[in-house]
Image (cartoon, coloured by chain):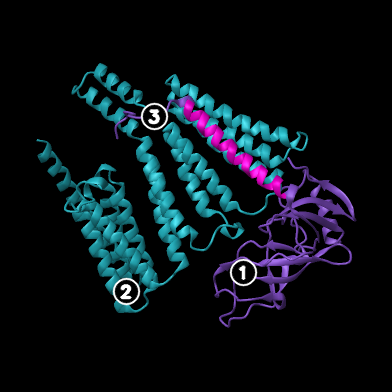
Chain colours: A cyan, B purple
């Protein structure tokens, strides 16, 4: 995404004579040479690793009886060893992209081996334990190889663990996921920081959001929803307020911590709208939501585009919701659409004015 | 985020550690089952029909046993709180035909007894209907409810199971975990399970 924007901008600047065409090419080449840059080849490599892994897993699913059990076992363990040593040898030579594909293949084959053993030896039950073991083995591989690609696999496996049927497990009790999900999220985020796999940390944050949803599904009360709102608000303020001691750490992780905390706050407010029936309560929630939207735009609007846009969306949705609840029944459908149109136009005008002001502020700072 | 890698294990050392670690995990899975088959106590269980009848999913047959339904009349001792998850210990004794049946069950550990084998169920949610009493029948699982078969062979086993002609021989570890040792069709062994 960024690359296509960059390419377009560079072309435009070259056409306007701001830079010469040669500089544009050099700049683009520099970007492409970064290891984190998106490249078609790299993506295709990972896809081919996934296809190989799928082949291994399908071999398992087919339960190929023609091959004796021990040979099948040795075969899949051989795939694991070959993948890790292939990846290791490629890393040693500096071929990071191809190595990443091998390591992903290794991590997925480990899961295939667990499934194969479970099936060949009729080990029914304990899918949770199997998923946890897979996650653990993948985390170990990500740490030891310091591999961003394997970190992404671990991030997805954290969701697999959370989604497995824990009624099929010997070890699980009902509180297990309550502490396991945040623990896995912390592990994934720490791994993402350690391996430099910046994007993988979103999986960790999303897992935390899913965890709160899980808590609410277990204890569906207004109190839980209020607790989630308060938690989201506190976490957001801790990440976004410059006075907060956590501000520096949160900023070092980019705009994500503040955004996800803000997302939790907003999701909590959405749930509260459902929990509260009385008019007064709903009005109170509506005012809190509008306040939270404005606070988000005011506090992090300048530095955090994601929070700003979520704030806009929340503000617009809440305004329309309040309009439909209050005057909607009085003025009829067509009248309501008219009012909605006016409201949206007013918000759009405010947003455009705000965006322009933010942009000119940035110019002033730079000048 | 900077791209400098301040510390990293030599990739081949990392490969060795990861490969050995993961192989050990797989080996442990295989061996934990093999050791139960080697040393576990023998029991023989009748299988029960499963409804709906077409439960052949992928390549495994779903097995159900008379001991999968525990009448609450044989449950002794304290009952856990409503809504919690618990495991039941079930004492099995053989009948005249050599088939093992549940004679006693408890939510606490049970003392071993000559001529009996204790099985532990998978955890399940206790429902006492807010009245502190169990339902008349408890439906439990032991982790031996699935048997993978070669493609296309599941149907015959299913029919036999539904005609009540299928028996299962299992071995039980001292902590109450069972593993399937072999399947018997009308008394004849059909799938003998080697250790490895």
**x and y percent of residue A303 in the render?**
21, 46
Secondary structure of the residue carrying tag 3 is: loop
Residue B141 lies, with reference to residue B2, above or below; the image says below
Q: Which of these two is toward me, B126 or A43?
A: B126
Q: Which residues are magenta?
A: B13-36
Which residue does the image show at 51% across and 34% down from the upper left? A104
Frontmost of labels 2 and 3 is 3
- Respond whether the residues carrying marks 1 and 3 are from the same subunit: yes
Which chain letter matches label 3? B
Q: Residues within 10 Å of mark 3 (few under 14, many from 20)?
A: few
* Left or right side of A221 for B66: right
**x and y percent of residue B16 in the render?**
52, 29
* Left or right side of A156 for A57: right
Secondary structure of the residue carrying tag 2 is: helix
Q: Quadrant of residue B74?
A: bottom right
Choose the circle earlier in sequence order: 1 or 3: 3
**Disc sitting over residue B8 in the figure:** 3
Q: Tell me the distance, in whole angstroms, between the alpha carbons under discs 1 and 3.
A: 49 Å
Q: Residues within 10 Å of mark 2 (few under 14, many from 20)?
A: some
Which chain letter matches label 2? A
Image quarter hosting the N terminus of chain A: top left
Q: Which of these two is toward me, B103 or A254?
A: B103
């Amino acid at each position: 995404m960024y690359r296509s924007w960059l390419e377009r901008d560079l072309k435009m600047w070259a056409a306007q004579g701001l830079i010469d065409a040669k500089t544009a090419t050099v700049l683009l080449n520099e970007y492409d040479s970064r290891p984190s840059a998106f490249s078609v080849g790299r993506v295709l490599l990972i896809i081919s690793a996934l296809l190989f892994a799928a082949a291994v897993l399908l071999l398992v699913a087919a339960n190929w009886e023609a091959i004796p059990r021990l040979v099948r076992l040795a075969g899949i363990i051989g795939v694991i060893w070959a993948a890790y040593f292939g990846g290791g040898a490629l890393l040693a030579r500096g071929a990071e992209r191809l190595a990443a594909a091998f390591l992903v293949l290794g991590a997925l084959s480990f899961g295939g081996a667990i499934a194969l053993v479970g099936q060949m030896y009729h080990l029914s039950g304990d899918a949770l334990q199997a998923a946890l073991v897979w996650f653990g083995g993948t985390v170990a591989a990500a740490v030891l190889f310091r591999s961003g690609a394997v970190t992404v696999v671990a991030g997805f496996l954290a969701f697999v663990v959370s989604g497995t049927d824990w009624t099929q497990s010997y070890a699980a009790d009902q509180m297990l996921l309550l502490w396991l999900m945040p623990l896995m999220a912390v592990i994934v985020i720490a791994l993402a920081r350690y391996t430099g796999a910046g994007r993988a940390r979103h999986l960790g944050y999303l897992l935390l959001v899913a965890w709160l949803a899980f808590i609410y599904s277990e204890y569906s009360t207004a109190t839980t929803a209020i607790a989630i709102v308060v938690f989201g608000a506190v976490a957001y303020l801790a990440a976004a307020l410059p006075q907060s001691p956590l501000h520096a750490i949160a900023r070092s992780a980019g705009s994500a911590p503040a955004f996800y905390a803000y997302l939790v706050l907003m999701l909590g407010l959405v749930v509260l709208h459902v929990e509260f029936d009385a008019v007064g309560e709903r009005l109170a929630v509506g005012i809190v939501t509008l306040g939270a939207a404005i606070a988000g735009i005011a506090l992090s609007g300048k530095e955090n585009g994601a929070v700003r846009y979520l704030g806009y969306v929340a503000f617009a949705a809440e305004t329309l919701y309040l309009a439909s609840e209050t005057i909607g029944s009085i003025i009829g459908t067509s009248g309501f659409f008219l009012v909605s149109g006016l409201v949206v136009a007013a918000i759009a005008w405010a947003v455009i004015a705000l965006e322009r002001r933010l942009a000119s502020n940035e110019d002033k700072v730079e000048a | 985020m900077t791209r400098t890698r301040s510390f990293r294990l030599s990739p081949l050392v990392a490969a060795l550690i990861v490969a050995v670690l993961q192989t050990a995990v797989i080996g442990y899975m295989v061996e934990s089952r093999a050791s139960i088959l080697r040393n576990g106590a023998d029991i023989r269980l009748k299988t029960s029909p499963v409804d709906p009848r077409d439960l052949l999913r992928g390549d495994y047959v779903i097995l159900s046993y008379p001991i999968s339904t525990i009448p609450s009349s044989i449950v002794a001792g304290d009952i856990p709180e409503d809504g919690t998850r618990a495991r039941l210990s079930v004492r099995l004794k053989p009948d005249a035909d050599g088939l093992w049946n549940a004679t006693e069950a408890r939510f606490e550990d049970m003392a071993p007894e000559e001529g009996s084998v204790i099985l532990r169920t998978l955890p399940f949610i206790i429902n006492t209907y807010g009245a502190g009493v169990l339902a008349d029948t408890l439906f439990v699982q032991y982790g031996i409810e699935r048997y993978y078969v070669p493609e296309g062979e599941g149907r015959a086993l299913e029919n036999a199971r539904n005609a009540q002609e299928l028996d299962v021989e299992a071995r039980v570890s001292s902590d109450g975990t069972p593993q399937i040792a072999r399947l018997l069709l009308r008394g004849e062994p059909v799938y003998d399970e080697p250790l490895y």
